[in-house]
Amino acid sequence: MSVPDKSEPGPQQTRLYTPQWVSLVAGGIAGGVEAAITYPFEYSKTRVQLSNDGPNRTSNPLRLIVQVARQEGVGALYTGCSTLVIGTTAKAAVRFVSYDTIRNSLADDRGVLSASRGMLAGMTAGAVESVLAVTPTERIKTALIDDAKGARQFKSSIQAIQVLVKRHGITELYRGLVSTMMKQSATSAVRKGTYNVLKEATKAKGIKPNVFTTFGIGALAGIVTVYATQPFDTIKTRAQGVEGAGIVEASRSVIRDYGLRGFWKGSSMRLGRLLLSGGIVFSVYEEVAAILSSGTHR
């Protein structure tokens, strides 16, 4: 009587792995597309979080978009956009390849990832992307937007990098690293965890995945993510203004200016962005990954 070879998965143990290069390329494309489409929401959210009450200032993100477009032109809404697109392309690539690598190791024999393991994989991927891609690009983007509402000492992303590094050294590009890591880890954990749970739930109900269901699941994951992680985003933005601030100082400035509700300042605009970005990034990623994977199996 022969003994089954347990090293070979049976019909019900087949696991589907996403090749790392597919995760890297598909994630980068999805991130770049998402950032370019939703940037005005990010611009408005950042301006609102950096502003203090005063004349000609508004805390309504939608009103701010209209105000900036009228006074400074539509192009002003894309201040710092190139930096964010490049950064988002890089961070999405890092995030997806990190997440899929960790997911492959944590999933069970059927390739299913539990809710807790999904959040762990997302949290780890968020920490990795914070160090490798997010912090420097977010620092420059935030400094550019902060500068645009006042002194206008920066003419471009390159000049902003040169000025900040000349004044404070290369470590200045990593100002706000801790707050960024907190924000990215929390955001990625909630977003990826929620998306994973919803995706498995639709599978269990026999709903076939397509671009529309993926967009809807991603959008719902974005909504949950906003309200669960907004305080981290607000602190990070304050910490990465032109002058910069520590986590404690940034938190105190929010409370001083707006009270505890201030930690959710800009959430409506971030909701608009993440609702769209959640749908865009996951649907684009899944479609591109499917195309690339099918090419490798021919």
Image (spheres, rainbow, N blue to C red):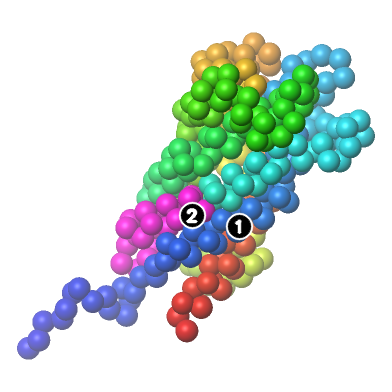
Name above or below for residue 103 compared with residue 168.
below
> Mark 1–mark 2 contact, CB under 8 Å?
yes
Identify the residue under disc 1.
30
Seen at 64% across and 67% down, the residue is 211
Q: Earlier in the sequence, mark 1 or mark 2?
A: 1
Let me know if residue 287 appears in the view.
yes
As helix, strand or loop, the secondary structure at mark 2 comes to helix
Query: Residue at horizontal 55%, vertical 13%?
Result: 249
Give the number of the disc on residue 96.
Answer: 2
**Amino acid type, residue under disc 1 in the picture:** Ala
Residue type beneath disc 2: Phe
Main secondary structure found in the magenta portion: helix
Neighbour class for label 1 at 10 Å: few (<14), some, many (≥20)? many
Vertical position of residue 35 compared to residue 149: above or below: below
Q: Where is residue 231 shown, x and y percent of the image?
A: 58, 28
Measured Cα–Cα span from mark 1 to mark 2: 10 Å
Where residue 56 sits in the image (x, y, percent)? 87, 19
Q: Quick one: 203 or 17, which is closer to the camera?
A: 17
**Segment colored magenta:** 93-114
